[in-house]
Structure formats: C-alpha cells, structure tokens
Amino acid sequence: MTPTSEENTSYADSRRPEVALITNHGYAGAEIPVGGAPDTGGQNFYVNTLALKLERLGYRVTIFARGGFPHFDGTSMRTGMEFLSEFVRYVFIPGGGAEFIAKEDIAIALDEEVEWLEAFVRDEADARGCDPWEVYEFINSHYWDAGVIAVRLVERWRDDAVARAMASLLEYCVPPDELELMESLRHARALGSSPGFHLGRLLIHHFALRHDELDHQVRAAASTWATQRRLRPEEENALVDQVNRSVATHEDADAPMRRLIAADALGQRILALCPEVDERLKRNLERVNRHVWTPHSLGELKDFNFHGRNPAVRRSLKFCERRNHERVVAAGSRAVVATSAKIADRLWVHYRAPVADTFYFPPCVDGDVFRPYSEEEIAPTYEYLAERTGLEIEQIRSSCIVFETSRMDRTKRKDLLLSAFAQLTDRHPESLLFIGGGPENEHFEYLENQLDETPALRGRAFLLRAIPDAHLGPMFSIADIYASASEMEGFGMSVSQAAAAGTAIVSSDWIPFSLHHAPTDCELFPAGDTDAMAAAMDRLLSNPDEREQRAERLREVARGLDWTRKAADFLGYLRRHGFEITEGLDNDR
C-alpha cells in the first residue's frame, strides 16, 4: 500500500530538485495492474522504474497521468495524488470525462488536461516563488498523447513570457483594458509563436479606428511608442520608414495582408530598439522549453508493420491522426529519446528529429526483480501455479516450462503461440505453457475458445490472467523458455526481463530487443509464421545444453542495460544539450 499525500510530508519538505514525467493513457499509477489493464504495460514499468532511479540519483519526481475515472479494479477513483515511494508521486489529471478512454481516442481529453495541468503547475510555482517553467528541471513525456500535453504546456508558457514582455513595452502606449484583454487572450492568440507580430498588431489595432489609411495607423502607433520611450524625432522617422519599406516589398498584397505585414515589421523593429527586453525574451522563450519526448512507439513504424492488414483493423488504429500528432510533438521537443534503433530511424527520417538531439535509452532491466531466484524463493510461485492450473507441484517442477506474459491484445499474437505449442505436445510430453496477461476481454475469450477447441492443449497450456507482483519475477526465473510472437513492440521489455532472469528466448523478428541487442542469442523466427515458431521452440526444448548457453549469454546482454547507470547518462546528455539541470541531493532535506 502506497502512502497518501497526508502521510508523506517528505516530498514537500525535501530540498531535492524536481523532475516531471507524463504518461497519460491506460492505468498508470503506483500499482500497475500487471499484464491486465487495457493500454497498460511496458511503458508504465519504464516510467515507474525511471522515476525510482531518478529518485536514487537525488531528485523528487512527479508523474502526471490521466485521472478522473475509476481504477482498473473499479473500487476507487483516480484522483488527487498517490506515492510510488518517498520522493516519487503520481498526480492524476482530470479531463475527458469519467470513463476510461482508449489511447486511439485519447485526443478528446487533452485540451482539458492541459488547462488543469497548467493551473496545477502555476500553483506549485506560486508556492515556490518562481515562474511555472522553473518548477521542474525538465519534463519527460511518454507516448504521443503525453507529448501533446507537454508541448501545449510549453506553448502556454511561451505565451506567458511574451505577454509579460509586451506589457513592459506597451505600458502607457495603449489603455490598461487592452493590456488586460491581451493577457486574458494570450493562449487563444498564441502570443508565444510570433512575439514581434503580436506586439505590432496590438499597437496598430489601437489606432485602426482613428485612421483610415495604413500609413497613418503606422505613423500614429510608432509616434505613440516613440514618445513613451523618449526616442529622438529622427529615430521615430527611421522606425516608420523601415516599416513602410517592409510593406512596400509586398505591393501585390491587399489591405488586410498589408496591415499584418506592417504589424510584424513594426513589432520586430521595436524589439530591435529594445535589446535588453529582446534578449531577455529570447532567453525566456528558450528556457521555457524543458521538454524531452520519449515516444516508445511511432505511428509511422506501426503503420509499416500493419501495411498489409485488413482496412478495418488499420482504420481502428488511426495511424494518420497519430502521425500528425507525433510530427507536432517532434517539432516542439527540445530533445527526443529513442527506445529502439527502429524508433531512432523513424524519428530521423520520417519526423526530421535531428540525430544530435536524440538520446538512445532503451527499456532497461530492474535486477532486483528480474533475476535468477533460489529454490526457496520460487516455492510460493509453484504453489500459485498449482492452484491456478490444478496440476501437482511436482509435475510442474519436473516439466519444461514455456512462458509468456503481456497485455491481452491481438498484436501480442498469443493465438499463434498456442498454435505453435500445440504442434509440440506429442514430441515434448514433459512441456507446459503458461500465458499471463489480461484483461479478460474479447481476445481473452477468443484464446479460451482456442484452448477448448484444441485437444493437444488441454492440460498442457494455461491462461494465468494477470500475474500478481509477488510471482512475476519468479515466473521468468522458473521458465526454461520465454516465447513471444508479438508483432507490435516498441522495444520488448518482457523479453529483456527474461534475458535478465537467465531464460532462453524464442522471439519473433519484430521485437527490437531480440533483433538489435541479442540477434544471435535469441532463437528468432519470422513474425506471423506458426510453423517457424514451433520449430524454434522445438530446437530449444530438444537441447538443454544450448538453452543453458543461450540463457547465460542473454544474462550478459541484460547486464549492460542497467537502469541507474542509464538514467545518470540521460541527465548528463540533457546537460550537454543545454538543459539547466541541478545536481541531485544526497541529503534529502
């Protein structure tokens, strides 16, 4: 049970610098419904583990996630905050209503979430006496929906910075009520996107009703501002001449367009005449963007993987909408993180993210959980399996175990795993197959029917549903083979966890960890090929020595994916990339 905000005062009292992570869809939280809840899986383990490692490095971490709807167990609401550990908290953002929303449809919730989050961070900033963008050392968003939230938040902070600069430049030039209106509409007008244009536009607009001709409007606006700034007459004339020359270069433009051109030219010249304000504004506009995006997967890559599928299947995944969101996020992020080589490739080629702005941070392995377990440690897990399956403990212990766990989704191809294993039951009568995952949705029912209708699988293959935390690590350890037929993975965290546990791996060739980190150590087969998967499992089931050798080499690969070391490298990369990141504190107070 995690402590409540009332029970945990350490976070608020700590002097540790703060970091924000955003993971928006699914059932993110301190307690993840392992292998069960829709849109909840590897990304959530990644975010929670990263947060804990940042805590170990001396930071406080706030993880923002969508709330306002019931937890997966249906007994409590996702509201307020909860603590993952002493210095890692979850804050639930309302928006989109009181029901769960699938990740393909989550865009309808984002506007409301951004507004709530902006107000929350502003309150945090007021309590600290700083600007909102100074609360967190950096903001790391995960997946495209969280990326949209972070980019929109940065856009709003840019609007704030420009509104502040405009107020200082236009005081006494336009009535206070117009400055108040500018402030209240700063987000609707996107002040941060073009400071010079909005500055000149507000000045010219103030005089538009008094003068019919654009020349007179520009002259009146420039004169008013020049008087307030005590410019010499020749400086005022030069200002007007420069604006008029800019407008003259667009002689074919009609009157409305000429006014917009004049506004931009006037604002740019005013900023040039106030270098101290201009430089401060530029610094602030750069500093507000502390966003680094970790997409985990990309619509472009998933679209490629599904290019031959039925149009109805592709339609439900909304690839076009997703790609458009991702392009906006890639363009608005100061740095991006690739969790696999394939994602890096698509980021560079399809989304034009600069290579120099990309950090490679694959899902690493928590060696405290995923490791070889002793006989004493795994005894309760054998009891759990006996209870779930009705088999005797000694039968399970003496069997060769094939294991897989992931969310209950058609892209994981658990159906193909069942079909492949069914080909082996006669040849390997000592083998058992355990499949974890949930929820008990339509796909779960489909797999249950497949089990019932396949005589070779009866008493040999079992759907365990969501595996309790206490048994998850030991399940990887007692397995002789971890087998994944998945056709949609950003990295393949469960496969890397199997490697850390010292378990031989049979993997489709669409799983990035297997393909890029251990191509010679995993037993690979072409994705979607049932016979090839059966043959791969047969080779390892038939050769215990080879299984053991592969498992040991995979453990060596997994040792190179250390979470704490990689998190420290990540902070170093961001500092080299210009992020102003304070060193973590060993002393928490």
Image (cartoon, rainbow, N blue to C red):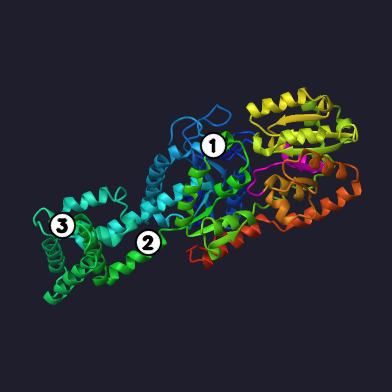
Give the magenta-colored segment's residue range.
Answer: 471-491
- How far from the left and from the top, in percent, is residue 358? 56, 61
Mark 1 vs 3, N-terminal side? 3
Along the horizontal axis of the image, is 491 left or right of 549? left
- Count residues near mark 1 (Cα–Cα under 10 Å), then give few for <14, some for 14-19, many for 20+: few
Could you tell me residue 2's position as x and y percent?
58, 39
The residue drawn where x is 52% and y is 65% is 575
Residue named by callout 3: 174
- Front position among marks 2 and 1: 1
**What is the three-letter code of the residue carrying label 1?**
Arg
Is residue 338 visible in the rendered image? The answer is: no
Q: Earlier in the sequence, mark 3 or mark 2?
A: 3
Helix, strand or loop under label 2 = helix
Residue 557: give x, y in percent of width and height: 75, 56
Q: Is residue 428 left or right of residue 518?
A: right
**Residue type of the residue flagged with mark 2:** Leu
Q: Which residue is mark 2?
A: 285
Q: Residue 475 lies in magenta, yes or no?
A: yes
> Residue at the location (86% across, 30% down)?
393
